[in-house]
Image: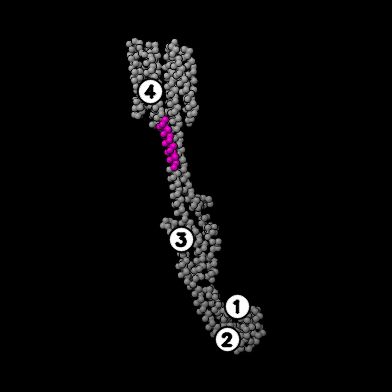
Amino acid sequence: MRDEKAEEGQVGGDGPQGLAAEAASSPSAREGATGGDSGSGSGGLRNWRIRSKLALIIIIPTITALVLGGLRMWESLDRADQLAQTADQVQLADQISNVAHHLQSERELAVLKLGAPADGSRGPVFDAQVEQTDRAVDRLNTMASDLTVDDPEMQARYQAGVSRLAALSSMRTAVSDNQMTPRTLLDQYSLLITMLVQLDREVTTAISDQELLRDSNAIHALSESKEYISLEGAIVALAAQSNEFPQYLLDDARNAMASGESALDDFNAFASLEQRQFYTDTVAGVELDRWQTQRDLAYARVQHDAPPQLNEESFTNDIAASRDMYRQAESGLLDRLEAESAGLADDATFAAWRDAAIVAAALIAALALMLLVSRTLLAPLRTLRENALEVAYVRLPETVRRILADPDPMEASRKAITPVPVNTKEEIGEVARSFDVVHERAVRMAAEQALLRENVNGIFVNLSRRSQRLVERQLSVIDSLESDEQDPDQLAHLFELDHLATRLRRNGESLLVLSGAGLSKSMTKPVPAGDVVGASSRRSSSTRGSRSAACRTSPCTAGPSTTSSTCWPSCSTTRPTSPSPTPGSACAPP
């Protein structure tokens, strides 16, 4: 009986491999699934596996870190590219200043050549300067064509400014053919040089670094100062050549001197202490002092309506030397600006790759830490899940069956619990311990149920045994009464009592069957019908002869159809003491 009940409680399956599918397909699982939020589909986030959710938790910050790190690196590399372009523009600006420097020398020689057309010695000097200027212009064209900047408008301005140098050809032809006045030629050269000086300012518009921007403004102010001083020198040289200083030339010279001093003030305002010191150390010498002294004397003589009385050769040599000093200072500052731009570009590139390496290292460390934490979550959770499924569908049914079959259920239940092997103290460990408690309570309830069943079965057995003994005594009394009774009517009543007592005995045997004890102790092997009839005949030998005759005329072996009032009493007196006849036998009651 216990085995049958245990088999009824056992859940079929293929072992731990099919436990998850079995759990998902169970009615309780389906009821729990449909009893939740009706708005969430089967593919909703809440139904994802823990591994997928943890992967999502790891992927989202990883992608965010990669995007932010990539943006940071892109900004650094873009800044490095801008600084590299600035360094290239500074190189181009240096070449532009070099072309302007040669044009300043060429302007002075061209004006002096036009002022003394009969002097044949000025032609070769002018031609030599033209060759130097052309070489500088060719190099400028090459550098301008090779320059690459992100701003197409700036690129176009560079190309347009360089292309305007093509006007030099017509100007030089006019000088060679004496087709232009010195002042007109001076103005045309000055316009071209001023265009180059302003083109040099394009570098300033491309700089975003404040320190580089200040240095660039200082260099541009120095270039303007150099141009005004060179223009003033050319005007004074022209006056020295003719030993007269017309008012218009004097005004132009003084305007150039004032503009040069203003530009020099701008340089001192923008330049750093180191740049000002470099300028002071470079732009200094006897030639510069002598040129300024001669210029001031010429201005003073003209104010008193006297000729300037300047030595043209000495003055032109001094102004050329002074112009070279300015060019040296300008070139040195541009070289420093280029070096600073290139250094900042290298620093920005290094910072970009350094930041990328730091982000990559931090990301790898974070991923490793997150994977480690995820593993510490998934490993006990997986162990808890596997043990829970195994307990629910394998171990608990087997334990219940074993407890029900064991003669000592409580002792069997004490050895039936195996704790879940999760020994952590966090939430998963607490769930594991709670599951162990639930498992223990379930096993204890099974043991208590087995004990209760044993008690109930014992009660049934006791009731059955007592009732059987009483029935046996009752049957003995009835047999005694039947053997002594001669009245047929009384015998019929006694036979009816005998039949009722037999039914009571069968009720007691039913209680034994319900208790699980069975009938093995009281039931014998089947008795042949002839033996039953013979025993009945011998048992009734002391009774009235009419009953034996009636029984012989209607044998009990005829089956249920012969259970007449004359046959059944004779058969009843020959019943075996144990067990009761089974239905359909020779002496079965109606």
Marks 4 and 3 sit apart, C-alpha to C-alpha, by: 91 Å
Number of residues whose C-alpha sits closer than 10 Å to that of mark 1, classed few (under 14), some (14–19) or many (20 or more): few
Q: Earlier in the sequence, mark 1 or mark 2?
A: 2
- N-terminal of the pair, mark 1 or mark 4, is 4
The disc label shown at residue 72, or none: none
Q: Secondary structure at mark 4?
A: helix
Does residue 283 appear in this view? yes
* Mark 2–mark 3 distance (CA, rounded to whole Å): 71 Å
- Mark nearer the viewer, 4 or 3: 4
Query: What's the amino acid at mark 1?
Result: Thr
| Residue under label 4 | 325
Query: Measured from the top left, where is residue 414 in percent x and y?
Result: 45, 67
- The residue labelled by disc 3 is 420
Three-letter code for the amino acid on which mark 2 is drawn: Glu
| Residue depth check, mark 1 versus mark 2: number of the one nearer the observer | 1
Image position of 290 (left or right of 363) = left
> Mark 4: which amino acid?
Met
**Disc 3 residue type?**
Val
Q: Which residues are magenta?
A: 338-357
Q: CA distance from mark 4 to mark 2?
A: 161 Å
Label 2 secondary element? helix
Counting from the top left corner in percent of width and height, residue 542 is at 60, 89
- Separation (CA) of disc 1 from disc 4: 142 Å
Residue located beneath label 1 in the image: 582
Give the mark nearer the N terminus: 2 vs 3: 3
Q: CA distance from mark 1 to mark 2?
A: 23 Å
The disc label shown at residue 482, or none? 2
